[in-house]
Image (tube, rainbow, N blue to C red):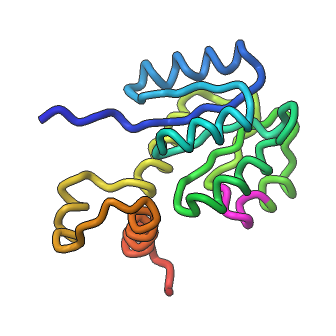
């Protein structure tokens, strides 16, 4: 059974860091699309939806939180991890309250990044066998319905009350 690796959209206007993160995530087995701006990220999302977005906070043009807001309007269940060299605890708390999956400050340990990615992907997608079991009688091709089913799945495996 040939399963596609999880797709990650990586957004950073620092080309060197973008290249380094892309190599690290690719080596860890992920399919990475790397872009240098929020506008390029939104264009990429229109073509192919990843399972996770990792973005820098401070970028030219639209910043990482602006990108998060745009993504959240289109795909509220898509997890977003924000990276920043300028993070404070209030920034991180505010971002997570808005729905950002995680907020990592640079420099970060590579293992912390990989653990955060694994956690985000665990929340955003379930193994296809699990997904097939609980939704075996639901047939859809609509992106909005897939997003809704993804939210239902994440809530079902969490301790949240709805």
Specify whether 95 is left or right of 21: right
Specify whether 117 is left or right of 10: left
Q: Is residue 59 above or below residue 125?
A: above
Specify whether 145 is left or right of 73: left
Q: Position of residue 153 (x, y in %)?
A: 37, 69
- Looking at the image, the residue that sits furthest to the left is 1
Q: Is residue 58 magenta?
A: no
- Front-most of 155 and 36? 36
- Looking at the image, the residue that sits furthest to the bottom is 162
Q: Position of residue 123 (x, y in %)?
A: 44, 57
- Front-most of 54 and 113? 54
Please give the name of the residue rendered at 23% of the width and 36% of the height, measured from the top-left corner.
Answer: 3
**The magenta segment:** 95-100
- Front-most of 65 and 137? 137
Q: Position of residue 5 (x, y in %)?
A: 34, 33
Q: Quadrant of residue 92?
A: bottom right
Please give the name of the residue rendered at 22% of the width and 71% of the height, measured from the top-left corner.
Answer: 134
Q: Quadrant of residue 9?
A: top right
Where's the N terminus, which quadrant?
Answer: top left
Figure label count: 0
Please give the name of the residue rendered at 23% of the width and 68% of the height, measured from the top-left corner.
Answer: 139
Q: Is residue 140 above or below residue 16?
A: below
Q: Is residue 98 magenta?
A: yes
- Front-most of 96 and 88? 96
Type of secondary structure dominating the magenta stretch: helix
Please give the name of the residue rendered at 84% of the width and 36% of the height, measured from the top-left corner.
Answer: 58
């Amino acid at each position: 059974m040939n399963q596609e690796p999880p797709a990650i959209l990586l957004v950073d206007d620092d080309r060197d860091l973008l290249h380094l993160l892309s190599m690290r995530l690719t080596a860890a087995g992920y399919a990475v699309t790397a872009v240098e701006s929020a506008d390029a990220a939104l264009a990429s999302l229109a073509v192919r939806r990843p399972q996770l977005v990792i973005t820098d906070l401070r970028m030219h043009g639209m910043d990482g939180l602006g990108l998060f807001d745009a993504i959240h309007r289109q795909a509220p269940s898509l997890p977003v991890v924000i990276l920043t060299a300028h993070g404070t605890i209030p920034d991180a708390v505010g971002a997570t309250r808005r729905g950002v999956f995680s907020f990592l400050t640079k420099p970060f340990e590579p293992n912390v990044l990989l653990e955060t990615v694994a956690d985000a992907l665990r929340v955003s997608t379930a193994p296809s066998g699990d997904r097939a079991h609980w939704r075996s009688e639901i047939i859809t091709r609509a992106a909005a319905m897939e997003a809704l089913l993804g939210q239902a799945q994440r809530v079902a495996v969490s301790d949240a009350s709805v």
